[in-house]
Amino acid sequence: MDEEWRALTERLRRESGGTPEYERLADTTDRDELAGVLTESGRPLWARELAAFRLGITGDRRAFESLVLLLNHRDPPRCASAAYALARLGDPRTARAAAALATNELRVAYALHPVRLLVELRAPESVPALITTLQRRLRPHDPYRRVALACVDGLGTLGDGRARPVLNEALAHPALAEAAVRALARIPRQR
């Protein structure tokens, strides 16, 4: 948490210009004040992200919608912070939302953090979503190799036998073959 918090606060302090509002939101212990930031109009993105992150890591489910929006943001640091907070939020909707984002072909460029979150959550939705996302990445000339590699690594981490067929397909792709071998080795053999 310390490293995530430090990275987030440094980035958001720069975005805010170090305003007194930033310092107040970073220091407050009033969850209602933080939740208000998420619903008040005219609040800057840095303030919403700071409030959502702080609420999320404390398990306050009022942060859920804001964190899911940030998980699907075009800026990778925002996605990473949102994934970190969502993993700690404890909201049962998180895995379903991450699976929807990971498998959305219109947003595949932003699927890396939802994929990683699914692996961390180890939810029932995780393996099917990773398999679907990886199958789509095995098309010729697919530009999203980082997403494919995250799926391969994640499926190995999860060790579910349902992933064996798609990981075997990944062996034919030079950029994924080594990771697929490692992932397959982590999946227990069926007897």
Image: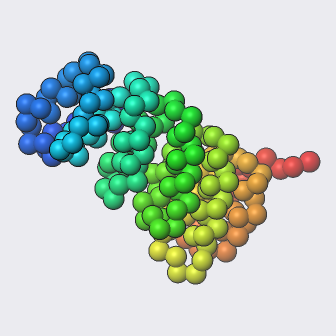
**Residue 146 visible within the image:** no
- The residue located at (49%, 51%) in the rendering is 114
Please tell me in which quadrant of the rendered image residue 133 appears.
Answer: bottom right
Horizontally, is 164 left or right of 156 in the view?
A: right
- As drawn, which residue projects farthest toward the bottom? 140
Please tell me in which quadrant of the rendered image residue 184 appears.
Answer: bottom right
- The residue located at (63%, 40%) in the rendering is 123
Residue 147 spot, x, y in % from top left: 50, 62
- The residue located at (66%, 50%) in the rendering is 127
Q: How many marks?
A: 0
Horizontally, is 131 left or right of 67 in the view?
A: right
- The residue located at (45%, 64%) in the rendering is 107
Q: Nearer the viewer, residue 39 or 24?
A: 39
Q: How is the image coloured?
A: rainbow
Please tell me in which quadrant of the rendered image residue 177 appears.
Answer: bottom right
**Residue 26 visible within the image:** yes
- Residue 9, compared with residue 167, is above or below; it is above
Residue 39 spot, x, y in % from top left: 28, 37
Horizontally, is 89 left or right of 100 in the view?
A: left
- Residue 33, compared with residue 154, is above or below; it is above
- As drawn, which residue projects farthest toward the right? 191
Residue 24 spot, x, y in % from top left: 15, 26
- Residue 100, compared with residue 46, is above or below; it is below
Quadrant assignment for the N terminus: top left
Horizontally, is 5 left or right of 90 in the view?
A: left
- Residue 70, compared with residue 131, is above or below; it is above
